[in-house]
């Protein structure tokens, strides 16, 4: 199918070209392959970023926290309509639509969801056609570098952002990245947004709006998941829908870190934590007979005990009482309805 040009595409492409020109005008960030950068096709970059809408059944686990109607962006990464996005936008969706740069909508199917990286893969159907972006390699983004953040769909736009941090990120939902990219200024349409370098390569996928883009400073920004995390697992995701390695033990808790201790704020219904009797207001102070230093250290010690299914010995403070709480962990993916039509 021929993609029809609309006024939005050339306008946004002109914006991208202008932003790239500003980047190349700064001598201390001029790349060695500036000639290649100058030949970047801004319209190709714009057309590769799509909008995504997803409808999720009300009885799905993620509907309680993420809602049933979701919107975000995605990036076409090959010639067959494969689209990379942030997984929570489409997780447990019963219906997914992809909105191309020309405004046309196409049905899409879920290919894979990876809870470790947070990535989701879709494939657009029914004659969808769009240019695709190559993935940047490890270490492609450097602190202080200016990149482009692009969103699709109804929030389509492009913004020049600076990488202001590269550090680990621990999420309250049992999620940890060894290295995430933090950018400023913040963009509102962040979930699934494309972070693109001057060579037109995809560097990261938007995940969150954060209050501290720079560690220790109240500077709002965004967190992007580096696409370098995709390459080692892409073959598994395409063949099996998930990475082929033992699943990490999952408890089913929402945690908040305070002074090195972890407060249980929520317990997922029907989760291992609920079955074990954990409840909001509990303080987790030990795991596997070990103390820990913060959320990231807790996750590493938890996952170091063994694969999903292992009994996790937690030490929990309830009031002034220290209570042992053994939790029979589970594979998180098995609690999600990743194909709600079945």
Image: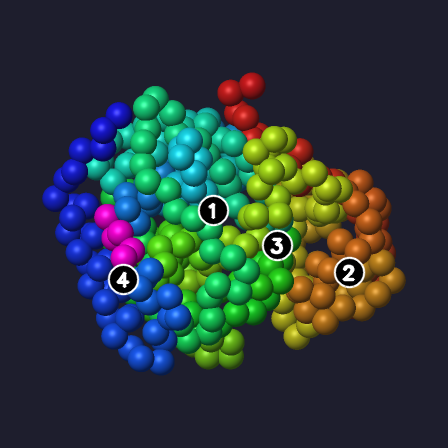
The span from disc 1 to disc 3 (Cα, nearest Å) is 13 Å
Quick one: 217 or 112, which is closer to the camera?
Answer: 112
**Residue 12 included in the magenta stretch of the image:** no
- Residue 179 picture location, percent across and down: 58, 64
Q: In this rendering, does residue 45 appear at all?
A: yes
Which residue in the protein does label 3 denote?
175
Which residue in the protein does label 1 denote?
86
Contact flag, marks 4 and 3 (Cβ < 8 Å): no
Quadrant containing the N terminus is top left
The span from disc 4 to disc 3 (Cα, nearest Å) is 38 Å
**Which label's residue is closer to the chain start, 1 or 4?**
4
Residue in view at x 80 percent, y 63 percent: 286
- Residue 71 picture location, percent across and down: 36, 42
In the image, is residue 280 above or below residue 115?
below
What span is colored magenta in the figure?
Answer: 38-43
- Residue 250 picture location, percent across and down: 71, 46
Q: Quadrant of residue 319?
A: bottom right
Find residue 38 and name its label: 4
């Amino acid at each position: 199918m021929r993609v029809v040009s609309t006024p939005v595409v050339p306008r946004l492409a002109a914006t991208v070209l202008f932003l790239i020109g500003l980047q190349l005008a700064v001598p201390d960030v001029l790349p060695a392959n500036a000639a290649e950068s100058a030949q970047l096709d801004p319209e190709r970059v714009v057309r590769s970023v799509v909008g995504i809408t997803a409808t999720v059944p009300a009885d799905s686990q993620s509907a309680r926290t993420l809602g049933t109607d979701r919107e975000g962006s995605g990036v076409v990464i090959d010639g067959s309509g494969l689209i990379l996005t942030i997984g929570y936008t489409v997780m447990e969706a019963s219906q997914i639509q992809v909105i191309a740069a020309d405004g046309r909508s196409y049905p899409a199917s879920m290919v894979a969801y990876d809870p470790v990286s947070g990535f989701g893969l879709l494939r657009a159907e029914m004659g969808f056609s769009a240019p695709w972006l190559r993935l940047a390699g490890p270490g492609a983004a450097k602190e202080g570098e200016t990149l482009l953040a692009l969103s699709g769909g109804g929030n389509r736009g492009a913004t020049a952002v600076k990488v202001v941090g590269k550090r680990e990120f621990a999420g309250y939902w049992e999620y940890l990245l060894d290295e995430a990219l933090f950018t400023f200024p913040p963009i509102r349409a962040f979930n699934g947004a494309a972070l693109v370098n001057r060579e037109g390569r995809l560097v990261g996928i938007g995940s969150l709006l954060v209050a501290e883009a720079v560690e220790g400073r109240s500077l709002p920004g965004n967190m992007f998941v580096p696409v370098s995390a995709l390459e080692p697992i892409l073959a598994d995701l395409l063949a099996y829908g998930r990475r082929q390695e033992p699943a990490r033990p999952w408890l089913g808790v929402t945690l908040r870190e305070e002074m090195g201790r972890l407060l249980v704020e929520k317990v997922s219904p029907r989760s291992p934590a609920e079955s074990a009797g954990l409840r909001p207001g509990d303080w987790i102070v030990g795991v596997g007979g070990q103390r820990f230093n913060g959320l990231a250290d807790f996750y590493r010690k938890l996952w170091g005990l063994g694969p999903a299914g292992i009994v996790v010995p937690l030490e929990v403070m309830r009031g002034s009482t220290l209570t042992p709480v053994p939790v029979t962990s589970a594979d998180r993916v098995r609690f999600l309805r990743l194909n709600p039509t079945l």
